[in-house]
Amino acid sequence: MTDMVATNETILVVGGGISGLTAALEAAECGKDVVLVEKNPSVGGRVSQLYKYFPKLCRPTCGQEINLRRLKANRRIRLLTMAEVTNIKGAPGDYDVSISVRPRYVNENCTACGACSEATSVEIDDPFNYNMKKTKAAYLPYNMAYPQRYVVDPSIIGTEEADKVKAACKYDAIDLDMQDRTMEIKVGAVIWATGWQPYDAAKIQPYGYDRYANVITSVEFERMMDPFGPTGGKLLRPSDGKEVKNVAFIQCAGSRDRNHLTHCSRICCMASLKQSTYIGEQYGDGADAKATIYYIDIRAIDRFEDFYQKVQADEKVHFVKSKVANITEDRDTGDVVLHGVNTEGYHRYDNAHDLCVLAIGMQPSVRADEIAENVAADASGFIQMNGADTAIFGAGCAANALDVNRAVQSATAAALRAIQVVNRVSSAEA
């Protein structure tokens, strides 16, 4: 990595999800040199794990393919995967940054032929599918992964399985001697786009996520619908593989709650409305399948109101205005039973469902106050703008709980701020 040249006119983008990609591309296409750092083996972030966007219900692969094409064509972007920023020191226009790079054990000779994966019998949890299935210890993160290179899991390094993987490669792409490395670079501005992580559903004890197999999260449900996901695109119960035809969605699972996340995560209502349409898609209009959404209030803002009304008109989707009190399990059937009070009429209910999906809250993957000095955090840990004391700018869900559209807008704004900083550096040195 000693061949990297970065100066105080370079922009560092941390995070290669939809926000980080957008910011890096916008800056580079304006003529700025960019270092893009992603901690995972490939770019794409959580958007790449979606089945569909709302409200158009289109697959994210189209927009992702366009961004990857732009990324591959732009020589001003230097991409570092399996890398994390460990330290940032300095001031606007003059930052010294330390980056730790983990070994992939696969070099650029890789053609993604898959021979290494076929050579090993060892399986590991698949993080792309939220550990709902296994993948080989030599793996491609997902079909559209970029870089299109395999990864060898460190758990087999030093074993006979690693030797099998190396022997299977015809292109001398397996390098079992790769080591952790540290880089030191200088940049003029930083765009922090490390995105969000789902709130830990196990902490919401009354809902039994860690006790009942048929209570899952909204991000896990999204992967179930994907043809390349853990169930091959079929709605099957985790407990017994039974077809799911009676689904409950619980809103504000861990959000707007002083015991968990106090903020509204903004995307959860629309995510559940979107996912309720998957039931009809899976079984067709004539089937007896149904979805029930348990909600405090539905927050569908701007153009999403039309989508909300469309879902309301769907006879397969039912709404119960209630904060679910707790969930139990029917041991004979494996069904989950939701208990609470419908506040429209104040009727108590004990409703059984095949599957319960928790619309889980969003929290920043990295708290703002852990990034560097002079980076301010709000009460939830998202990055706050802090005047002229810093040129570390939050983008996307590092700055707020946002849907994809607003995350892209946020990233474009962050790129503009970073460009202004390095332009001032360039003018001062001219």
Image (cartoon, rainbow, N blue to C red):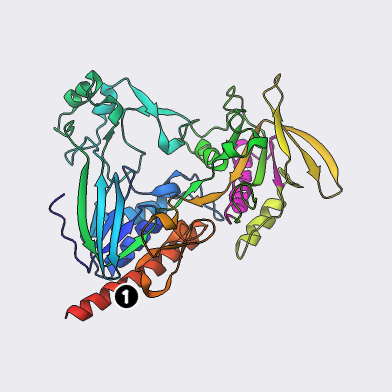
Q: Residue at x 32, y 45 (%)?
A: 42
Residue 142 sits above or below residue 410 on the image:
above
Q: Position of residue 36 (x, y in %)?
A: 29, 56
Quadrant assignment, res 93 = bottom left
Drawn side of residue 174 relative to residue 417, left or right? left
Residue 233: give x, y in percent of width and height.
Answer: 51, 35
**Label 1, residues with CA under 10 Å away: few <14, some 14-19, many ≥20:** some
Residue that mark 1 sits on: 420
- Could you tell me residue 3's position as x and y percent? 12, 53
Residue 120 versus residue 58 in the image, above or below: above
Q: Which quadrant is the C terminus positioned in? A: bottom left
Residue 398 in view, yes or no = yes
Q: Is residue 226 left or right of residue 355?
A: left
Residue 228 visible within the image? no
Q: Nearer the viewer, residue 408 or 369?
A: 369
Name the quadrant containing residue 167.
Answer: top left
Q: Position of residue 290 (x, y in %)?
A: 70, 38
Q: Residue at x 41, y 69 (%)?
A: 413
> In the rendered structure, which segment of residues is drawn in magenta?
265-294
422 relative position to 322: left or right: left
Q: Amino acid at mark 1?
A: Gln
Nearest the camera: 195 or 110? 195
Query: Helix, strand or loop at disc 1?
Result: helix
277 within the magenta span: yes
